[in-house]
Amino acid sequence: MPYIRRMRFERAGEGDLAARLFGRDRAHVTELLRAAWAPAVGADLARRTEVVGVEGETLRVRVPDARWRTVLHRMQPQILARLRDVAGTLAPRRLGFVEGTLATPPSPRLHAPHPPADADCPPAVADEAARIADAELRERFLAAAGRYLSRAPGRDAR
């Protein structure tokens, strides 16, 4: 049996790519982290927060109130890991939070808009959707239901 040598793929140098591309200039690092913020926390959370800047190894993030600060504090290890995936050695080691109103109004959506609700939704689905008080959530529910039901011909929601 021939000797098979296992190759090891290491990611050691990958994190340094961001450092080579963006250098150590604080303004460049801040812009990199701003761009990485939405993918790291998700579109909905990114709409409610704002990257303020970098202070040493701390990324400062503006949050609307103490409740959001608590939520993000609990998510900090996961957020930092995701930022590390993008920024490598330029990623912050901790998050710091500033409470206040966002300087820029939140964008309506950071992702592609949902297609309009399918007019051919079964009455049972439309009846259930009517019970959803939030108009945006109701619209999103109907759009998702329409997409799902359009993929499964012959399926009927009863």
Image (cartoon, rainbow, N blue to C red):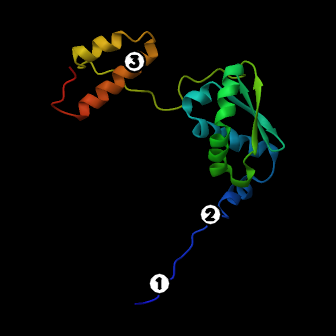
Q: Residue type at mark 1?
A: Ile
Mark 2 crowdedness (10 Å alpha carbons): few <14, some 14-19, many ≥20: few
In terms of depth relative to the viewer, which is nearer, 138 or 28?
A: 138
- The image shows residue 109 at horizontal and vertical percentages of 53, 26
Mark 1 against mark 3, which lies toward the viewer?
Answer: 1
In the image, taking residue 96 as reference, residue 9 lies left or right, namely: left
Give the residue at x 62% y 45%: 82
Label located before the other in sequence (2 or 1) = 1
Give the residue at x 74% y 56%: 19
Give the residue at x 23% y 14%: 123
* Image-quadrant location for residue 116: top left
Q: Which residue is mark 1?
A: 4
Residue 69 at least partly seen: yes
Which residue ends up furthest to the bottom in the rendered image?
A: 1
In the image, taking residue 73 as reference, residue 126 lies left or right, namely: left
Q: Which residue is mark 2?
A: 11
Residue 89 is tagged as none
Q: Which residue is mark 3?
A: 139
Q: Is residue 18 above or below residue 50?
A: below
Q: Residue type at mark 3?
A: Glu
- Secondary structure state at the residue bearing disc 1: loop
- Secondary structure state at the residue bearing disc 3: helix
Q: CA distance from mark 1 to mark 3?
A: 57 Å
- The image shows residue 79 at horizontal and vertical percentages of 64, 40
In terms of depth relative to the viewer, which is nearer, 6 or 48?
A: 6
